[in-house]
Amino acid sequence: MWEFLARSLEASMIFTFAGLGELIDQRSGVLNVGIEGVMLFGATLGFIAAQSTGSYWLGFLVGITIGGLLGLLHGFFSITLGVDQVVSGMGIWILGFGLTTYIGNPYTGPLGMERIPTILGLSPFFYVGIVLVIITWFVLNKTSLGLRIRSVGENPSVAEVSGINVARTRYLCVITSGMLMGLAGAIYSLDYNPVWNYNFLMGWGFIALALVFFSMWNPFIMLGGSLLFGTMWQLSLSPELVLPGVLSRYIWRTVPFVITVVVLLIMSTKWFRIRWGAARPEALAIPYVKE
Amino acid sequence: MRIGNYEFYLEKRLTLAGWQAATISILAVVVALALFSLIFIQAGVNPLSAYQEIFSYAFANPYGLPLSINRFIFLLLCTCAFIIPFRAGLWNIGMTGQFYAGSLSAFAVLFAFGARGSSNLDLPPGIVIPLMLVAAALGGTVPGAIAGFLKGRFNTNEIVVTMMLNFIAFWLVSFMIKEGGLFMNPGGRSESFDVPSSVHAPLIMGTPFTILLALGIAVLLYLMFAKTKIGYQIRAYGQSPAAAEYAGISTFKIPLLVFIMGGAIAGLAGYHYFAAVPGVYKIARNYVQFGDMAFYGIICGLISQGNPLAAIPIALLFGGLSIGGRFIQGKLNMSFGLDYALLGVLMMTLVAFQFFYRNKIVWVKAGKERADVGIPS
């Protein structure tokens, strides 16, 4: 049981890292639907780097760097070129899915390195994740940088007039968010489940995207959501630990996805929007063109 | 920006003629293929001879050509499934799930006729095949309708919903064909039972009849968008849902309708690949590699700019490319996934070229007066 809980907490952290990245992105008004692609890239290249050099540090570094670069790419398309952000995000996802399948295939199999040591029975990333959530909340809500990010996400033309460089602020956010997503992928393939497989993520990135909508753009609610979904995911992987013999394991695997749809549905209802809504960044997914 | 004697600047396109869109699309494909040759160079293969091998296998080889055509039919159906919501401004990335649902439904018909027991069962093809087609379309409709209903009624993000439905359908297929599932092969293999030879899809010169179905759907869709009221309503909704509502177009019915149509067409692709392609005739063990090819539909849809007729040659090209890529990866001992890598490179190039659909680069000789001086762009 403790094993199950610990694994759930570790799974939650992957959602947290990816979700935090997307949350920062969206707060600045940029939508990135390609989280899964960035995570795949971070996971695959991080895995390859760690395996060929034998250094975890290098693996994570490569994961973060490639994430940042993909964030930059998304920024270039959506901020500088003004391409539809959904199109660009889709592009990053399919690029990640396609290229990592090709690049990673020769490395199919386990990582074959000693596991990352745990702290009090939990992966060190659990603690890093909690700290990051607090930092993100603090920066977004209590600092002038956070105010700038939020104002750019709400009304970029007004922000521009008041002296904020919209493009620069957004670039900062997309790169940071890409790094977090790349790190999330690297944590998956180096720590949580150190095995490379064909399309091994199976929807983590898209659930993280749903989590951000669910969080109403608040890092703490997002942390709660990640804990919920991490536990659910772990349960769907090994239902026999909690409910042995109930339903086929294939049916269990669909459960996190069904619940994501249901949660999204509840959040989209009018009741929910009136009661809790109004937190959505006004300028989300609208390209900003400087006059 | 100045280069030599010429001054370059950007200008917003106000209109985009058909031939301009076609030129940009062709350029995008050429650039993507050029970029992709980097992968060949990295693997130590001459890109020109690699492309020659790909095209000659895909379009001039007696083994490759039927594979390309079958892939083309599948891609064309998936592209149409993507295009219909795309014209309404919505993203259907759930072709994979709709494809799985369609194939499961088609096999459910066979199961109901008792085909699991024996592959020599004598079934009346005139009844069973139409039933399978209808079932496949209806099966694909189910995930489509869920996404469309949620979008229309609650404005739920259709990208996340269709993606979630993909995974749900994926695991449901595993549930049905593996570990004692209802459709499991009686021989104990982790794949579905065989389609009885009496109800194999009729072939036209070695090609399944579904090719006529796919081409017919593309033409009908073109006519629907160009000539009918509903096509006009879909396009109007795609331009601006708010304006469409003001004009009396239901913002509930249009999303629901486009996703139902898209889902039904993707469901037919499920019938095509698992019940009509010679040599398959079952839900294969590696069905995920068939399903993931549906993402090529997104690319075909984007390149064709939502025009179902333009999608025909594009689907044929990509069908051939993906088959040829898979072939030379074996022949040249390259790593698995060449066709996936191509998918990624094409998609990214396309995204970059989206810019040119809306802007153009104009150049004038330096020193000349610009015609639009004083007019803010």
Image (cartoon, coloured by chain):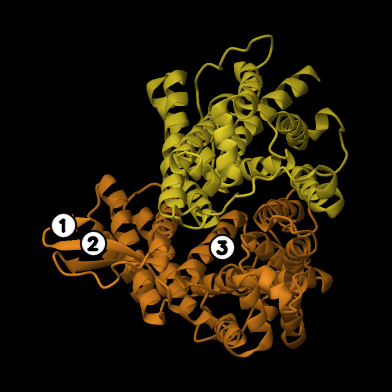
Chain colours: A yellow, B orange
The residue located at (36%, 70%) in the rendering is: B24
The disc, 3 or 2, on the residue closer to the chain's N-terminal end is 2
Please report contact status of discs 2 and 1: CB closer than 8 Å, yes or no. Answer: yes
Q: Nearer the viewer, residue A56 or B179?
A: A56
Name the spot of residue B88 as percent of width and height, x first.
63, 71
Q: Quadrant of the C terminus of chain A?
A: bottom left
Distance from the alpha carbon under mark 2 to that under mark 1: 7 Å
Mark 3 near mark 1, Cβ–Cβ under 8 Å?
no
Judge if badges 3 and 1 mark residues of a common chain. Answer: yes
Q: Which residue is mark 1?
A: B3
Residue under pointer 2? B8
Q: What residue is disc 3 on?
A: B294
Question: What residue appears at the point 65 percent right and 56 percent down from the top-left corner?
Answer: B159
In the rendered structure, which amino acid carries the disc numbered 2? Phe
- Whether residue A166 is visible to the viewer of this picture, yes or no, is yes
Q: Position of residue A275 (x, y in %)?
A: 85, 44
Amino acid type, label 1: Ile
Up/down of A9 relative to B264, above or below = above
Do tag 3 and tag 2 residues touch (Cβ < 8 Å)? no
Of A177 and B67, which appears nearest the observer? A177
Return the residue nearer the eye: B97 or B299: B299
Q: Nearer the viewer, residue A44 or A273?
A: A273
Q: Quadrant of residue B186?
A: bottom right
Q: Position of residue A219 (x, y in %)?
A: 68, 30
Amino acid type, label 3: Ala
Q: Chain of mark 3?
A: B
Q: Is residue A217 above or below residue B248?
A: above
Relative to residue B367, is residue A133 drawn left or right?
A: right
